[in-house]
Image (cartoon, rainbow, N blue to C red):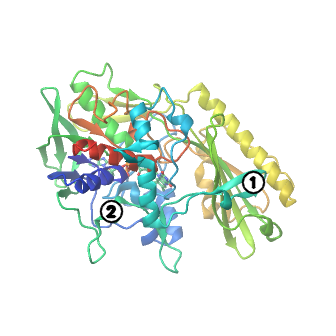
Amino acid sequence: MVVGGGLAGLEVVTALAEHNAQDILLLESGPGDDLAHIHLSLPQDQATEAVFAPENDPWFHRPWESDSAHYTGISGLRRRLGGRSLYWHGVVLPLEDWALSAPWWPSDVVADLTKSWRGGPSLYERVTGDLRKWSFLTPSSAEGVRTFGGQDFLPLPRACRHSSGDGRWEAYTPLARWRRADGGPRPPAGVRVVCEAEVLAVHVHDGVARGVLVRDADGATTTVTADAVVLSAGTVESTRLAVQALTEHGSLPEPRLGGLADHIVQGFVVRLPATAAARVPEPGSYYVPADPVSRSYLRLDVRDTAPGELLLDVRVTGEQFPNHESSVECVPAPALPWRTRIHAALHPQDRELVAAQRETLRAFWGHLAEDLGLPAMPMEFTVYGDPARDNTRVLPSRTRSQAVGVPETWTSLLGTEDHEGGSLPLGQTLTSRHEFADLPGLYAAGPAVFPRLGAANPSLTTLALSRRLAAILAGAG
Ligand SMILES: Cc1cc2nc3c(=O)[nH]c(=O)nc-3n(C[C@H](O)[C@H](O)[C@H](O)COP(=O)(O)OP(=O)(O)OC[C@H]3O[C@@H](n4cnc5c(N)ncnc54)[C@H](O)[C@@H]3O)c2cc1C
């Protein structure tokens, strides 16, 4: 039984079916009748609005509270079959060696990801190869380097397909492997999907997870049994379900799990005059990989906004360090689900990273202003976590009225990058076979299981680990 049909859960069930596993049940709290990526079904501006003004997205749902501005705003679930696999941008980067190094990630998981899996190519090689076939993803290579603002940028790998002519695109979703002859998705043989089925709790009997308690669209609740239960309901919901189960089972001293982390992301946007356009790389997305000291990667998006005019969107994405104080906490009560509250805490190393990222951005801006012959306007930032200067600064409605040549800085609130993870770490809360160490029969998938995040976007690793878990459950791993 797989709880949650988003990027991780769908990859687990699809891979299970490819191992010829039978009797797989996928429970999804949202509906399953619109399975198109938002950038395929909506024009660019409306898709951007659905993400950044989530009150316009009927599937947006935030089942938690936060005791700060972090994990508010656009931070939440997209409750529909497909989950955030129908919203993501397809950026696929492997976790950096420095993040995968001891002592955080279990060595057997790292070897499967990076060296060899089941006697063949590594999981990263296999997933990247499959995504390349699906999307014509081009590998980053030395020939693609663009030197700009004193940095050597590589093309950013994205698992995306463009639809012909109208500028629309979609990023990979495991639903792409569910295609019927008429183009619509249908579950593979052996998989049953139940939508509008909200899982309220894990059913534990004799110290073993035996199924779940589900509420259907009419509000009726039922216990559904299973030999194995996989939590893939998004990091916070999976952690809420785990906190409830582990508390009732007596294996948590307090109803909370720490380690919750998102990426620390800051940047600036600047409109460039037509005179500068010739010296800027052609429109597209580029990046400079993260090194072990900065633990952040630099990304550059070049967009042509008006004839002869360009917009540069520059950002650094860095690792929030694993921190027990940053947590998902529940309030035990007879009614289910338990109320869930996020406490986002910064580690001292995170504060250093925030300051270092700002220096990187200032240095890059100084360099490129000089290269482009622009006045080097000073670059100011407000306090970290300021909701008045968050990543909504990059919205076209804001940048359109921005003065040319003047950089506008912004800092994401934690949770709003949608890269949240780390609260059910492999090798700690979970064994290296993805099973809860204190609750046999219960497993987890998604970025929640990362022992540390690194700087890379999580989904390549999410897909790889979902395949690893499926092989384990099918007796093939
Ligand atoms: C706009 C956007 C752009 C992004 N771009 C990138 C990118 O370029 N690269 C990258 O690596 N990552 C990106 N991400 C992040 C990526 O999409 C997430 O990390 C990923 O989707 C997480 O997978 P998941 O399966 O854990 O959660 P989700 O995909 O959110 O799936 C969780 C599913 O569980 C269901 N669910 C929740 N609670 C319950 C319950 N109680 N019972 C039953 N079902 C439940 C939800 O409805 C949902 O369908 C992006 C995200 C967004 C929103």
Regarding mark 1 in the picture, which secondary structure is present there? loop
Distance from label 1 to label 2 (Cα)? 40 Å
Hey, which residue is sitting farthest bottom in the picture? 165
Ligand 1 under 8 Å from disc 2 Cβ: no
The image position of residue 68, as x and y in percent, is: 50, 35
Q: Which residue is located at x 12 percent, y 26 percent?
A: 206
Q: Amino acid at mark 2?
A: Leu
Residue position marked by numbered label 1 in the rendering: 407
Tell me which corner region of the image, top left, top right, bottom left or bottom right, holds residue 308: bottom right
The image position of residue 313, as x and y in percent, is: 66, 57
The image position of residue 341, as x and y in percent, is: 39, 34
Q: Classify 10 Å Cα crowding around label 2: few (below 14), some (14-19), many (20 and above).
A: many
Q: Which residue is located at x 51 percent, y 43 percent?
A: 95
Q: Between 129 and 230, which is closer to the camera in this rendering?
A: 129
The image position of residue 365, as x and y in percent, is: 77, 50
Asked if residue 92 shows in the view, the reply is: yes
Tell me which corner region of the image, top left, top right, bottom left or bottom right, holds residue 241: top left
Regarding mark 2 in the picture, which secondary structure is present there? helix
Q: Is residue 223 above or below residue 406?
A: above
Residue 111, disc: none
Q: Is residue 429 above or below residue 268?
A: above
Q: How many marks?
A: 2
Mark 1 or mark 2, which has the lower sequence index?
Answer: 2
Asked if residue 62 shows in the view, the reply is: no
Residue 175, disc: 2
Q: Which residue is located at x 48 percent, y 36 percent?
A: 261
From the viewer's perspective, tell me whether residue 134 is left or right of residue 336.
right
Q: Between 383 and 424, which is closer to the camera in this rendering?
A: 424
Q: Classify 10 Å Cα crowding around label 1: few (below 14), some (14-19), many (20 and above).
A: many
From the viewer's perspective, tell me whether residue 266 is left or right of residue 242.
right
Tell me which corner region of the image, top left, top right, bottom left or bottom right, holds residue 357: top right
Q: Is residue 334 above or below residue 289?
A: above
